[in-house]
Image (cartoon, rainbow, N blue to C red):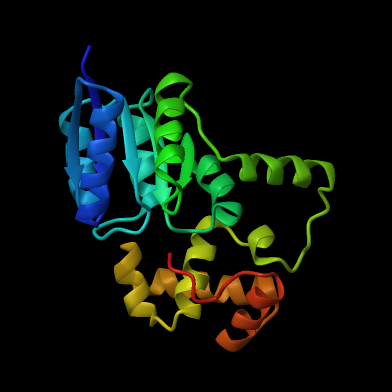
Amino acid sequence: MALKVLIADDHSIVRVGLTLLLKKIHPHVSVIESRDFREALEAVAAQHFDLMILDVNMANGNYQDAIDIIRRRQPRSKILIFSSLDEQLYAIRYLQTGADGFLHKLASENEVEYAVKQMLNTGKYISEKVKENMISSFLHGDKQHDDPLEILSNRELDIARFLIQGLSLKEIATRLNLHVATVSTYKTRIFEKMAISRVTDLIERFRIHGIVPGEKI
């Protein structure tokens, strides 16, 4: 039986590498490649996929809307987020958003192969480090009320990081496919939640909690 997989990533070398690995794992795999969210959603509208491997940092859309649309159109398909973001900070957030697994792009070839096999066999994958972090958080679960990762929503966290990277409201709006006024509202909400008034304060708050301000989204 043919396996159908969608690979959505804006880097061709990533798509090629994953395609080769998939052909190694499953001899009858059919792979469709997409370079951005628009192409990915067009593919999802046209055919069913058993597995979708998605980056979260692509043009022409945003991951939250994409996952929502995929879940409505193909609720039984499995979604593996393949990202350069810190898995300790983001893996659980993406699972809560609707993904079935999270894999870091710095993972070894063996780990990538294992993650793909787990997604195909069980429909779920997170690394051992993330599992340990989840257990630790459960056992020692006092939240820090000034921790950005605890008090900001997924969208607010995205916008906070873009602000830290020095992007303007217009640039952020373009990246996330939002209106400038909407981004401005989010910025105000972020500042209110964190009791700050400047982006420099935001940078400092992230550093205090061990979050790298310049990290790529």
Q: Residue at x 78, y 41 (%)?
A: 138
Q: Toward which corner of the image does residue 79 lie, by quadrant?
A: top left
Is residue 209 placed above or below 29 in the rendered structure? below
Q: Position of residue 203 (x, y in %)?
A: 60, 81
Q: Nearer the viewer, residue 17 or 176?
A: 17
Does residue 198 appear anywhere in the picture? no
Task: Give the position of the C terminus as an image quadrant.
Answer: bottom left
Q: Is residue 104 left or right of residue 46?
A: right
Q: Position of residue 83 (x, y in %)?
A: 42, 53
Q: Residue at x 45, y 74 (%)?
A: 162
> How many callouts does the rendering have?
0
Q: Nearer the viewer, residue 169 or 119?
A: 119
Q: Position of residue 155 (x, y in %)?
A: 49, 60
Q: Position of residue 109 (x, y in %)?
A: 39, 42
Q: Residue at x 46, y 27 (%)?
A: 118
Task: Give the position of the N terminus as an image quadrant.
Answer: top left
Q: Residue at x 27, y 29 (%)?
A: 24
Q: Is residue 68 left or right of residue 26?
A: right
Does residue 86 appear anywhere in the picture? yes
The residue at the far top in this view is 1
Is residue 186 placed above or below 63 in the rendered structure? below
Q: Is residue 146 left or right of residue 181?
A: right
